[in-house]
Amino acid sequence: MANAAIAVQDCSKRYQRGAAAYGSLRDTLTRLVRGGRVPGEPVQALDEVSLAVEQGEIVGVVGDNGAGKSTLLKVVARITPPDSGRVVVRGRLSSLIEIGAGFHPELTGRENVLLHGSILGLTRRDLRASLGAITDFAGLDGAIDTPVKYFSTGMYARLGFAVAVHADPRVLLVDEVLSVGDLGFREACYERIRALQAGGTAILFVSHDLPAVAALCDRALRLAAGRVVDQGAPEAVVAAYRAAGEAESR
């Protein structure tokens, strides 16, 4: 981990789900009897998770909803701090974690490119020079001067990805946002991800698209209840994850 682009060491994160002050005593007792969670009960989103992503490496993360995948990305992106453990990121970071994150709904696509790109550390000169390429990649030639509050989720995702990859990141975090795009756009995104990898970018790729994880990634790990329960070759991790899901559904 000493020189990894992303180094996560023994990170844990706990959240409070709901608030204990809300709901009646009857509701609380009913949930207890039925085995449900009581509002305010802590949820261990990450439990001593460690991983490293080297320069030019794509590491995939799979797991059920609530396994801790998005929390892991948010900890790496410094959106939320871990309760314990250490995270080191080396180089400019771009993240695609939530659709439209960092976009102002009242601003146009063009204005949001300038705003979001500045947050990522790009100069206005660089952004203006890249605006045509960003617009073309996102397929928004006819909508770039429209306020983004009128954008569909797919348009949001295309613009967010286009800005992120044109920021020349050394570290890229990708969550499920690509799933809202059409097949042609997803293929273009995967092609760009491979190009970034060839240029030395470290990529942490979270997805329920198991074939994409197997095809794109150099390594993969599976999270369950906030812990790393499997890691290794992506094909093997994906196969074990599928087998575990089939066994649970029987």
Image (spheres, rainbow, N blue to C red):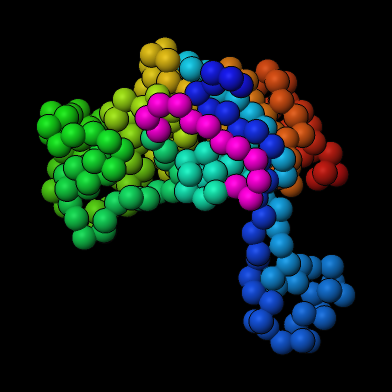
Q: Position of residue 149 (x, y in %)?
A: 26, 58
Picture quadrant of residue 18: bottom right
Residue 1: x, y in percent? 61, 21
Residue displayed at 69% across by 70% down: 40
Q: Is residue 139 left or right of residue 59?
A: left
Residue under the point 59% across and 42% down: 72
Relative to 243, residue 99 above or below = below
Of the pair 139 and 198, the residue shown nearer to us: 198
Q: Nearer the viewer, residue 127 or 176?
A: 127
Question: Residue at position x 65%, y 40% from top?
Answer: 85
**Residue 83 in magenta?**
yes
Q: Is residue 17 magenta?
A: no
- The front one of 44 and 146 is 44
Q: Is residue 39 above or below residue 138?
A: below
> Looking at the image, can residue 73 be seen?
yes
Q: Would residue 146 appear left or right of 159 to someone viewing this image?
A: left
Relative to 10, residue 25 above or below: below
Is residue 143 at all visible to an observer of this figure?
no
Residue 29 on image: x %, y %: 82, 81
Q: Quadrant of the C terminus?
A: top right
Residue name at image x 72 percent, y 87 percent: 24
How many numbered callouts? Answer: 0
Residue range corresponding to the magenta coloring: 82-93
Q: Position of residue 181 (x, y in %)?
A: 39, 39
Residue 69, image quadrant: top right
